[in-house]
Image (cartoon, rainbow, N blue to C red):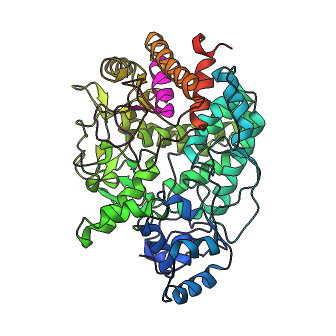
Amino acid sequence: MTKRYAVSGARFAVALLLLTACRPSDRQFVRPPSYDPAHDIGSLFSDVQLSGIFPDSKEFVDARPRFAPATIEARYDSARRTTGFVLRAFVAQNFVLPPQQAAGDGYHTVASQSMTAHITALWPVLTRPPDSADARSSLIPIPNPYVVPGGRFREVYYWDSYFTMLGLVQSGRTDLMKDMLDNFAHLIRTVGHIPNGNRTYYLSRSQPPYFAAMVGLYARATDTAHALTYLDAMEKEYAFWMDGADTLASGHAYRRVVRLPDGVVLNRYWDDSDEPRPESYRPDVEIGQTLPESLRAKFYRNARATAESGWDFSSRWMRDPRDLRTLETTELIPVDLNSLLYNAERTIAAWGFVRNGRGDDTLFRRFKQRADARRQAILAMYDPKARFFFDRRWRTGALVTDRPSLAAAAPLYFGIASDDQGKRVAARLERDFLKPGGFVTTNFASGQQWDGPNGWPPLEWLTIEGVRRYGRSDLADKATGRWLNLLDRTYRSTGRMMEKYDVVNANKKAGGGEYPTQDGFGWTNGVALALCAQKAGPCKD
């Protein structure tokens, strides 16, 4: 698992991707001048990650080698054979560990501050300056300031940033929004896509593609002329997600694209590596060891693809919702992912029309046709009997109707659902998903963090605004009140804004997942301010 190896289909490009329809064996990869922890220090990587020295695998991949990785690898090969060798001491001598501090970085809550005042005070605390290039760091440098989520999440995260930006708009920080958009455009130009986060170990995957939605948000907060500069980046990111579509046969999949028997191309989540995730190495390996060796690569690929979805992990992705080993994410066409790409197609079409308003509407026509075709395919992911949207299995075409989740709100948020569908979905969301603290992610208590009883800020926003778009302002206001009251009660008792919340029992802390619940927290702050702009109550100073 830990050996260094040359160019192959499993090793993802960390330089500019060749965004063509070539097969994996045709792809030429260039090694970046940066630190790749899982492959640069030999067996030391797996030995440390499996030793339990660090309860959180992310801590070691965020550590900076004090010396050249090859030098550390050679020292380790020699030192570990000596009497009295202590692995922990060796790591301390050869690596600078990331700071052990909470999101606040020394910030202390002021007891008299309201929740909104607290959030406003946190923006500079969660903002990081431009990065300096460092070949001994797993951090991918980006040229402008950016907001991190907080806690163990020390870098920028892709889909988090859209929901963080909602709050930046309310705080009048469109300058910081532009900095973050410029950073993402920079990553698209230099890496070929927006990775999960700006770390080398995230380069083999992306996250839910919210870049076009960010551009639209920025345009509404400023003006379209400012946003037009991102059209080329939107097209290039779209090409990453659609890589291979032009030559794909019906009924087949390649990377992130699937061509259905009727010829329509939709998307799935994917990862170009089938190794354990470096930032979650130990839990991945421990689960992998319970599987036959022939099935481990498939599990690792699906674990990584699920991380690309942002919903890591959820019963939504498991054939057996109680068994994480049955992850089947790459077999599914997610309704929310395709709603995002529909929005990207619509945005590119609209921006292309504005830019080429002198009569050249080729870009507009091409992307409008793609958006229209995708919309029809998404509408077919609605089950009239269940009155809900579901993911689809791409091999069989069957809807996964036994896994209802808040992903069904995405076609409402992006205006894809028909009026009748939107109202029926809203009714079911109210009946089955609205809890005392807001909307629950799923009604299945699997122990995974993207299941009940947890509610997550991005899904609260999508669902609240989705039902509002289809005439259910009453439901939106009710859910907003419950969610903001939960956030305010938690803030007043802890002084913190959390990553996720238990919306079923407000007296319990959200749980599940591979790490403790983090505080800070970028997307919670952003959604809270955006909702507060629509409602009083706990938002009043």
- Whole-percent x, y for residue 81 in the image: 48, 89
- Say which residue appears at 57% left-offset and 71% top-offset: 36
Would residue 164 be visible to someone looking at this image? yes
Front-lying residue, 269 or 132 = 132
Q: Is residue 369 above or below residue 31?
A: above
Where does the N terminus fall, quadrant-wise?
A: bottom left
In the image, 159: left or right of 268? right
Would residue 358 be visible to someone looking at this image? no
Residue 446 is a magenta residue = yes
Where does the C terminus fall, quadrant-wise?
A: top right
Front-lying residue, 39 or 206 = 39
- Whole-percent x, y for residue 96 in the image: 66, 66
In the image, 245: left or right of 137? left
Q: Which stretch did the figure color magenta?
A: 444-468
- Say which residue appears at 35% left-offset and 31% top-offset: 453
Front-lying residue, 92 or 431 = 92
- Say which residue appears at 69% left-offset and 71% top-offset: 135
In the image, 297: left or right of 246? left
